[in-house]
Image: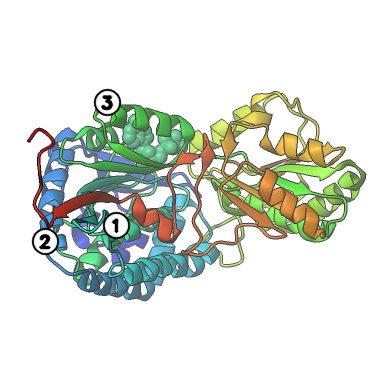
Amino acid sequence: MTIDPRLQSHLPSPVLQGKTLWIGGAWRAAAAGETIETFDPSTGKVLAELARGRKADAEAAASAAREGAARWTALSGAERGHVLRRIAEAVRARAESFGLLDTVDSGRPISTTGGPSVAHAAALFDYYAGLADKIHGATVPMGPDATALVEREPCGVIAAISPWNYPLENAVTKIAPILACGNAMILKPAEQTSLSALLLAQIAHDAGLPAGVLNVVTGLGAEAGAALVEHPLVDKVSFTGSTATGRRIAALAGEHLKGVVLELGGKSPLIVFGDADLKGAAEAAVFSTFMNNGQTCTSCNRVLVAAEARESFARHCREAAAKLRVGDPLDPATQIGPLVSARQLQRVEQYMDGLADERLDIPGYLPLEGGYFRKPAIVTTFDHESRFAREEIFGPVMAIRSFGDDDEAYRLANDTEYGLAASVWTTSLAQAEQARRRLQVGIVWINCVHALSPGTPVSGHKASGLGIEYGLEAVEQYMRVKTTVTMHGGWRSPFA
Ligand code: ADP
């Protein structure tokens, strides 16, 4: 079994032997004994082997989750909250391990994985821990003779399918609200970046999460993922990933009449009005476009700038981008690592095909040999109807286009199938207010970008999703409603 020695002290020992299915509180190999490899994107070398889960494994996980749901709902909300708080602490205590695992598995720099991403993941557990005992129902007035009681109960078993771009945070964004409501779940992490989810499963167990409440099935989307979506013991599906895969999952879930929560792609605008702080806006555009190599669903890399400010803004962008440090993600000074996979690098190159090569002069671009690195690019000349201009690229590429007046700015911003996020730069209060009203997106950032907390809901509009992540609102989708009407004065049949 191939195993990168750097992983040794960070993962449970069965995981190092390829037993990466966490089912009913125990590690096991795939029923068919098959494995897949996971790679270090900064060198292209194999890191470890993962169990290749299929239908039989999804079946085992769904049965275990059913039993886990019974154990979990037997606890009070306060007790569940207490367990989630202990998991938050355990995540913080293993920050170094989570940082290392996500960095070698996904290529995200260690400066972003160990500290900020662990803090964010732990904060999500704390936030939803606090909600676990505050989920309650309502009564509906029905006159003097009847009482209507509306309760919210957990859905049951949820399958959560997560992507590779922010492995730990994206998993926890699902896990924390799903468990806070009293559901059990099966997580199918992305095949490229499953390692941190495996550590998380073990520490959640050690922190007191009952067996079967959180199960993890590794494997491929079309196999393990699809098998979970279809499984009759799975009540609901929560997915984060590309819009194309989201459509497939929604179609399959629809056949089985299962609800879905979908957090999908984006082509988010960053609008710079003529009155804006151009240097600040440029720094925001560079951060939003290039952080995690543009592999961020809310990346605002479709930059729209007032025509009169275009030249000066583009210069500020080039200056800010020239300072980027791209290279070994394990170097604490690195800001950008490789793309996640050879396939993702190839996808990005396809979008760039035929475009004038506007790759920047970046002295700090120091790729490692064999890694999936790509030099950040700022593109100012392109066909506005091309795939480059209209589709989500998920790579380190900024597109700058100018607009004449406000109406054109908002028309261009909304002229996309997506509706996830927007960042707006202006010093005018009236313009900020207009932006909030006119932009067809789930989150608007005014004079900032990527400012989020566990309490701020994000709900993709249009093809960016179906459902909500973060906030009080996220729990609603993992509960179902039950109404009980009691008549006090005796019921009389209308037929009588
Ligand atoms: P990418 O195409 O870059 O791999 P996806 O959005 O397809 O990104 O993947 C996000 C997650 O969805 C991953 O965990 C992946 O395994 C899973 N997935 C992919 N295809 C399917 C599918 N047909 N059914 C269920 N899950 C899937």
Mark 2 and mark 1 lie on one chain; the one further toward the N terminus is 2
Residue linked to disc 2: 71
Q: Which residue is mark 1?
A: 141
How many residues crowd mark 2 within 10 Å: few (<14), some (14–19), many (20+)?
Answer: some
Q: CA distance from mark 2 to mark 1?
A: 34 Å
Determine whether, in the image, residue 83 is placed left or right of residue 316: left
Q: Secondary structure at mark 3?
A: helix
Nearer to me, 94 or 49: 94
Kind of residue at disc 2: Arg
Outermost front residue: 496
Q: Is residue 199 above or below residue 38?
A: below
| x and y percentages locating residue 112 in the rendered image | 53, 63
Quadrant for ligand 1?
top left
- Few, some or many residues within 10 Å of mark 3 (<14, 14–19, 20+): few
Q: Looking at the image, which is closer to me, 462 or 7?
A: 462
Residue 376 visible in image: no
Image position, residue 50 (x, y; %): 27, 46
Q: Are marks 2 and 1 in contact (CB under 8 Å)?
A: no
Q: Residue 255: which numbered mark, if any?
A: 3
- State if disc 3 and disc 1 touch (CB < 8 Å): no
Which amino acid type corresponds to the residue marked 3 in the rendered image?
Glu
Q: Which amino acid type corresponds to the residue marked 1 in the rendered image?
A: Pro
Q: Position of residue 408 (x, y in %)?
A: 80, 36
Return the mark for residue 487.
none
Q: Nearer the viewer, mark 1 or mark 3?
A: 1
Is label 1 in a helix, a strand or a loop?
strand
Q: Residue furthest right?
A: 308
Horizontal and vertical percent position of residue 418: 58, 36
Q: Quadrant of residue 287?
A: bottom right
Along the viewing direction, whichever of 475 and 68 lies nearer the viewer: 475
Earlier in the chain: of badge 1 and badge 3, it is 1
Gap in angstroms between the C-alphas marked 3 and 2 = 30 Å
